[in-house]
Image: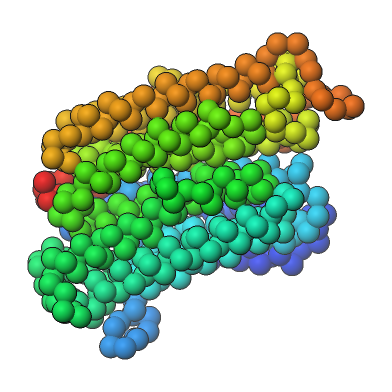
Amino acid sequence: MLEALLAVTFLAAFVVLLSPDEYAGKLAFVLSLIPLVGSLLLWQAFDAAGNALTDGTLAFETQAAWLEFAGYEIQWFVGLDGISLPLVVLTTFLTTLSIVSAWTPIDERQSQFYGLMLFMEANLLGVFVALDFFLWFVFWEAVLLPMYFLIGVWGGPRRKYAAIKFFVYTNVASLVMFIGYMALVFSLPVETFGLPETTAAIAAGQIDPILGLAPSTLLTAAFVAMFFGFAVKVPVVPLHTWLPDAHVEAPTPVSVMLAGVLLKMGTYALLRFNFTMLPEQASALAVPIAIIAVLSVIYGAMLALAQQDLKRIVAYSSVSSMGYVILGLVAFTEYGLGGATFQMIAHGLISGLMFMAVGVVYNATHTRMVTDMSGMADRMPIAVWILVAGAFAYMGLPLMAGFAGEFFIFVGSFGSPAAAGLMPVFTAVAMFGIVIVAGYLLFAMQKTLFGPYRLEADYDVGRAPVHDVLPLAALLAAIIVLGVVPDLFFEMIRDAVMPLVENGGGL
């Protein structure tokens, strides 16, 4: 079934790429419904237990020999567990909504734009289902290409600078991560790139010294290299500087996919590689990782507080929110790991809603500057009130997905013995980030949405079109449903992360 999901998404991308521009948007939407329905069917039929890399069972597994390279067997190895399935559903859901949100702002080269969006979706799905490192790395790198062109061709005035900066940062990070993982693989007796086999060999202590490095030193070096590579993608402070430029220059639908799914590639990989394969190194380096997490939460929030561009505010708030995910991972408890995974989904929905709502306001006003407008609630009430609801979800309002994710993380972190028993302190400091989030979001909303109507432009602003509002409503509904019934995903996530906790996680 996973092969069919990937194949139909790639095929849809090529069909849209070859279609006439005037039909490309509607055709892309219709074709994007196929992987969306497919992912929902996978969710409905899902039956797996445990983490796929630590003796868990996979759902929809396919494992077949593909080719041999330097004595190493490369496999077509795909499957789902409770960590990857929610991200697959998130990817297909956000892609469909992003395509609809592009109908207003994208008015040139539509077939190429929508084709690249679907091509990016196919590769994102590949990242979340692949369980052979070679296969996974192909999908991981292939995601960069459509994102580079989507920013560089359809972006704002500084689009080329932003696209090149995004590509260079993430490409260098991938290279460092690749070197770290290869050093790990070549030190093991198993001649495979299969992630479960590699994880089992490391857990069994089968690591051999290479290049004169003792096994413990080699494992630590591999952990640091992979952490650097994935942390750039998250991104964490101080490796975050590519993100605001990419968001500001990218068109709205691309920002939605960037914040909603691409950033999750980094945290997903951190969980799969660093915290699953090398739990002892994660435990040994827990203090610096927790400091990076707290720094990302507070510094990202402070930077957001200083911005006047609505898109930069949401972009920097993403840096802050992803810091909570790192904090949950390093806590290494049932609710810490589970909450971090749940927060990936919650943040994907909420950040997608915020970027999409800012895009709707921009489509009507042609400005994102807080100082240029006020009273937008009088002119486009439905879109504005959904934006307000999204902002409250970002602040962690109860019965919304953001509250559930952050609550799980805080509960898991407070009770964690990680980081030399300092996790309660790190968690308490990180919680102040919520106060700062509330501060900058309330400030921005008060200035732009309420009060007397004012726009520094010579044109009038009317209600947003229906096709701009419907994706916002769908995202808000998903945020509320997941906040009221978090077990829709959390139960399967908890089943998947429990083997890591039970194995001790090096604590």
The residue positioned 40% from the left and 32% from the top of the image is: 298
Residue 206 vertical position relative to residue 314 in the rendered view, above or below: below
Q: Is residue 312 above or below residue 33?
A: above
Q: Residue at x 32, y 53 (%)?
A: 270
Between 178 and 218, the residue placed more toward the observer is 218
Q: Position of residue 144 (x, y in %)?
A: 54, 63
Residue 382 appears anywhere in the view: no
Could you say where residue 30 lies in the image, as x and y percent from the top left? 66, 50
Q: Is residue 489 above or below residue 439?
A: below
Left or right of 451, for residue 141: left
Quarter of the image where one finds residue 114: bottom right
Q: Quadrant of residue 232?
A: bottom left
Direction from residue 455 to residue 427 in the image, left or right: left
**Residue 88 screen position, x and y as percent:** 44, 51
Report the number of numbered marks.
0
Residue sitting nearer the eye, 477 or 313? 313
Q: Which residue is depicted at the point 82% across and 25% down? A: 456
Identify the residue at image location x=31%, y=63%: 225
Q: Is residue 223 left or right of residue 346?
A: left
Residue projecting furthest to the right: 458
- Colour scheme of the picture: rainbow
